[in-house]
């Protein structure tokens, strides 16, 4: 029916002079966009099936393929964009909620890009990280308020459990199920080699990965999938997921098609059944309930592991964070509205929540105003795209960042935002065995290690330029930041001066 | 032109300190001669001294040294003081009119003790009470500024070269067992006397040469504990950190040095288990009190003097000893001018504190 027709957004352009009809593209595309015409000995393409994941482009041995924007356009309209019109047509035909994957791609301000860093000139020296120690080690956890001394006058170690990280970054929650076994293995091994942590997400922990426990954050979310005592005690920390930046206020839904084999076993739910996490935790309808869950988990783990409470950045974030800081949590993780997801309703992803830079600034300041910043560490994610974002986040007040989209990119993700289709050609967001095989964890973990090591080098260079040789002296050091192109209110919330001031 | 506190002003500096371990009092003349040698390390925009043991007759009272911009500010401040303290004695601080020092504010001195009723009502200990009152005056009374608030010690500072500031305050007429001095080289003109150094709170005084890169991290952390950084200077925040760690957290000066110039993790990893545990603890517990970037500081306190460099030793600092007297200065010349014949002279390593205690024998070196 012509009313259901949507012109493809992307077009696969094949250079016939280069194409040798080897059919690699046909084999590689799980979406079946390419088709070999035996009679003509040539390959044709259905652009409508293309998700622009670049798998065929990358594997074409003769570089015969490229993908371009199709350029088909509706009559120009500043109010009704082509995207808006298409989405409306799709809903009129399906009656369904629009689904999307990965982070909010819309044109909202990225405050990280409007903050600039300082460097030393004349009055104090910059420090060369190649010649002097440059410390990026961080520890996360609550700090006691009192110093206790033993009979000999020596200071007693009264610290609650702490997490030690070689750099202020961790891999953020991505469940086994939403991503593949091989992707999980890559993250776990990389975390171990790097001396940082990765996060199970709400999918339980595959028994093969218990050995990476010291480098694992085990998550407890509203569906409680895969949660049992051994699981809780296998990790370095326990994270209560209250919300996610990509979809604040709603739960999760892993379609039954992905609940196969080990995924089903790990989640402790029957094969083929949808894994639906409720929007709220049904045992947490208020802050005092959260406190009970925090302490239940501490009891279950014998007070040996810090408890992280992860929340989405929403309007009233600083008051919520203040409540959490008084609830016994050791660490608060704040996920900004740019954070990624394996699937979320498009309208929620694109319209709910606030930028993490603003959320972080106001939370950090609020906790300081109340004198309780020391009660908790702050981890921020959604979205950290480079080492410069890390430096800026730490200078705004974060102890550490969560990295997920960037990690997936390192594993081969091309950000086609089609995870919810389950046919990830790069073997990451899929459970189809022949696709999962494409992601080689041996290569994947090394690429993750490379990425983080590269970022750590850059982090050290930027710190050294500022004359700072320890990451803790960067934390909350907002004098090292200047805003550019920001209004008074934005500067006030970020707690930074404008460039030139 | 904005005043110190409304804008952050980096400065280079000269520092010098003398302490007699046996508590033998000496005239302020020596410290003036010492700091004057380092004339070129300051630029005439700030100089000052702290002197310990100078008010033995009033040793049980807080000596408040005040700058007033106007008679009105003085009146308002004195009313405040009368509501909170017994004022035992008040007078102008004696000065000498000299050509080099101009535009002086009204400079007054009060010896006070907290009113017992007010103190009881506040539920604070005496020193907390005194500290709160100092902050109240400095943040709420326009044109009044407490620049010294310890017992049996005092700070004397002004806009000018330090040797001129010393003559202005007739420092040679005071006798103390410890003096520190500061010559300032700010990168623009503050023109306000309160911005000169030393910076002091209660009996802690700090002179500092450097520009710390951790400033805003330190400031935002310390302001959480009730301190207000009104001057935006490194020296101010360092003083508060020392007050916080020593008076409020009960750390000794060796531990304080391990916090603010913490050993590198790679050094800590090589330590014996017990020592390693202590240093790990201090770094985790007081991460926000770590100071990075160049500094050399002299911290005067009730029972002695601590000298400390940043952990990379990005600022010069030399120690000399002669008998019971220990000299510490940015340059050796500043020591030799007053004591050419030293028993020992050395440069402490970065992060290695030199703590000289009154009647405490040898300088403590770690």
Image: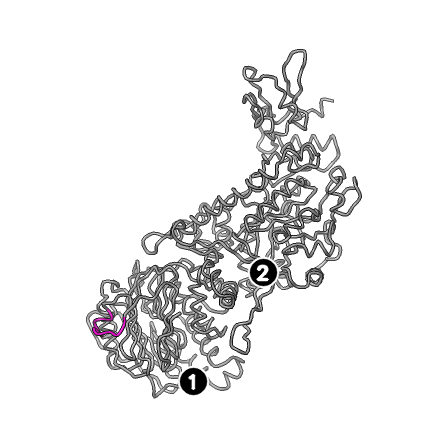
Task: Give the quadrant of residue B330.
Answer: bottom left
Q: Position of residue B263 (x, y in %)?
A: 44, 62
The residue sitting at 28% across, 74% down in the picture is: B321
Q: Position of residue B86 (x, y in %)?
A: 42, 86
Please report, as a chain letter, where disc 2 is located.
A
What segment carries the magenta color? B334-344
Q: Which residue is mark 2?
A: A162
For residue A263, side relative to residue B97 (left or right): right
Q: Quadrant of the N terminus of chain A?
A: top right
The residue sitting at 65% across, 27% down in the picture is: A29
B301 vs A181: above or below: below
| Mark number, residue B113 | 1
Can the viewer see residue B97 in this picture?
A: yes
Outermost residue toward the top in this view: A39
Is A48 colored magenta in this rendering? no
Mark 2 in CB contact with mark 1 (< 8 angstroms)? no
Q: Residues within 10 Å of mark 2 (few under 14, many from 20)?
A: many
């Amino acid at each position: 029916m012509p009313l259901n027709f949507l012109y493809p957004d992307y077009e696969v352009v094949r250079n016939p002079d280069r194409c040798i009809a080897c059919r690699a593209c046909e084999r590689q595309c799980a979406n079946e966009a390419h088709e070999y015409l035996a009679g003509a000995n040539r390959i044709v393409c259905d652009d409508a099936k293309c998700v622009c994941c670049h798998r065929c482009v990358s594997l074409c041995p003769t570089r015969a393929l490229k993908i371009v924007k199709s350029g088909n356009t509706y009559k120009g309209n500043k109010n009704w964009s082509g995207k808006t019109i298409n989405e409306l047509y799709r809903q009129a035909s399906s009656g369904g909620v629009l689904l999307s994957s990965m982070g909010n791609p819309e044109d909202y301000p990225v405050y990280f890009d409007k903050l600039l860093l300082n460097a030393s000139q004349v009055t104090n020296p910059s420090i060369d990280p190649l010649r002097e120690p440059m410390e990026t080690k961080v520890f996360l956890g609550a700090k006691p308020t009192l110093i206790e001394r033993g009979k000999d006058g020596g200071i007693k170690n009264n610290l609650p459990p702490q997490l030690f990280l070689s750099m202020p970054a961790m891999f953020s929650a991505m469940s086994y199920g939403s991503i593949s076994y091989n992707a999980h293995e890559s993250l776990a091994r990389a975390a171990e080699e790097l001396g940082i942590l990765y996060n199970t997400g709400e999918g339980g922990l595959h028994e093969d990965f218990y050995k990476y426990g010291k480098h694992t954050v085990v998550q407890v979310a509203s569906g409680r999938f895969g949660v049992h005592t051994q699981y809780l005690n296998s990790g370095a920390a326990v994270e209560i997921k209250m919300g996610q930046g990509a979809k604040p206020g709603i739960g999760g839904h892993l379609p039954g098609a992905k609940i196969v084999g080990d995924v089903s076993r790990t989640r402790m739910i029957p094969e083929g059944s949808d894994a639906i996490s409720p929007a709220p935790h049904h045992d947490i309808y208020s802050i005092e309930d959260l406190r009970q869950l925090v302490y239940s988990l501490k009891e279950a783990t014998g007070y040996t592991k810090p408890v992280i409470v992860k929340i989405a950045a929403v309007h009233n974030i600083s008051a919520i964070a203040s409540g959490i800081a008084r609830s016994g949590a050791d660490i608060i993780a704040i996920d900004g509205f740019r954070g990624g997801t394996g699937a979320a309703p498009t309208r929620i992803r694109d319209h709910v929540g606030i930028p993490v830079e603003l959320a972080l600034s106001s939370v950090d300041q609020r906790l300081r105003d109340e004198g309780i910043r020391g009660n908790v560490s702050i981890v921020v994610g959604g979205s950290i795209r480079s080492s410069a974002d890390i430096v800026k986040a730490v200078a705004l007040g974060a102890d550490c960042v969560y990295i997920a989209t960037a990690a997936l990119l390192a594993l081969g993700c091309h950000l086609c935002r089609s995870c919810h289709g389950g046919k990830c050609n790069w073997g990451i967001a899929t459970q189809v065995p022949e696709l999962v095989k494409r992601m080689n964890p041996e290569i994947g973990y090394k690429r993750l290690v490379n990425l983080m090591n590269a970022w750590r080098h850059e982090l050290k260079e930027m710190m050294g330029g500022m004359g700072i040789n320890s990451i803790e002296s960067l934390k909350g050091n907002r004098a090292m930041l200047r805003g550019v192109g920001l209004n008074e209110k934005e500067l006030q919330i970020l707690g930074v001066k404008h460039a030139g001031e | 032109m904005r005043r110190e506190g409304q804008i952050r002003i980096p400065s280079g500096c000269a520092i010098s300190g003398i302490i007699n371990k046996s508590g033998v009092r000496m005239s302020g003349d020596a410290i003036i001669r010492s700091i004057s040698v380092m004339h070129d390390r300051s630029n005439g925009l700030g100089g000052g001294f702290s002197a310990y043991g100078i008010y033995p007759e009033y040793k049980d009272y807080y000596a408040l040294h005040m700058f007033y911009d106007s008679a009105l500010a003085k009146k308002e401040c004195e009313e405040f003081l009368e509501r909170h303290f017994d004022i035992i004695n008040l007078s102008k601080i004696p000065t000498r009119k000299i050509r080099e020092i101009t535009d002086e504010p009204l400079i007054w001195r009060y010896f006070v003790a907290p009113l017992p009723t007010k103190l009881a009502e506040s539920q604070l200990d005496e020193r907390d009470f005194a500290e709160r009152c100092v902050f109240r005056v400095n943040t709420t009374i326009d044109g009044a500024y407490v620049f010294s608030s310890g017992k049996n010690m005092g700070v004397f500072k002004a806009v000018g070269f330090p040797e001129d500031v010393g003559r202005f305050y007739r420092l040679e007429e005071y006798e103390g067992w410890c003096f520190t001095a500061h010559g300032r080289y700010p990168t623009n003109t503050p023109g306000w006397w309160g911005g000169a150094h030393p910076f002091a709170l209660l009996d802690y005084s700090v002179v500092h040469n450097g520009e710390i890169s951790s400033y805003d991290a330190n400031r935002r952390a310390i302001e959480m504990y009730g301190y207000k950084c009104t001057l935006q200077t490194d020296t101010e925040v360092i003083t508060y950190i020392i007050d916080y760690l020593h008076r409020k957290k009960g750390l000794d000066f060796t531990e304080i040095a391990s916090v603010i110039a913490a050993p590198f993790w790679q050094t800590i990893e090589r330590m014996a288990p017990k020592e390693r545990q202590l240093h790990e603890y201090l770094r985790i517990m007081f991460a926000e009190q770590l100071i990075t970037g160049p500094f050399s500081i002299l911290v005067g306190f009730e029972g002695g003097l601590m000298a400390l460099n940043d952990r990379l030793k990005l600022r010069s600092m030399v120690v000399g000893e002669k008998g019971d007297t220990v000299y510490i200065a940015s340059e050796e010349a500043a020591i030799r001018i007053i004591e050419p014949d030293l028993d020992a002279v050395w440069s402490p390593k970065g992060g290695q504190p030199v703590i000289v205690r009154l009647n405490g024998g040898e300088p403590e070196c770690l």
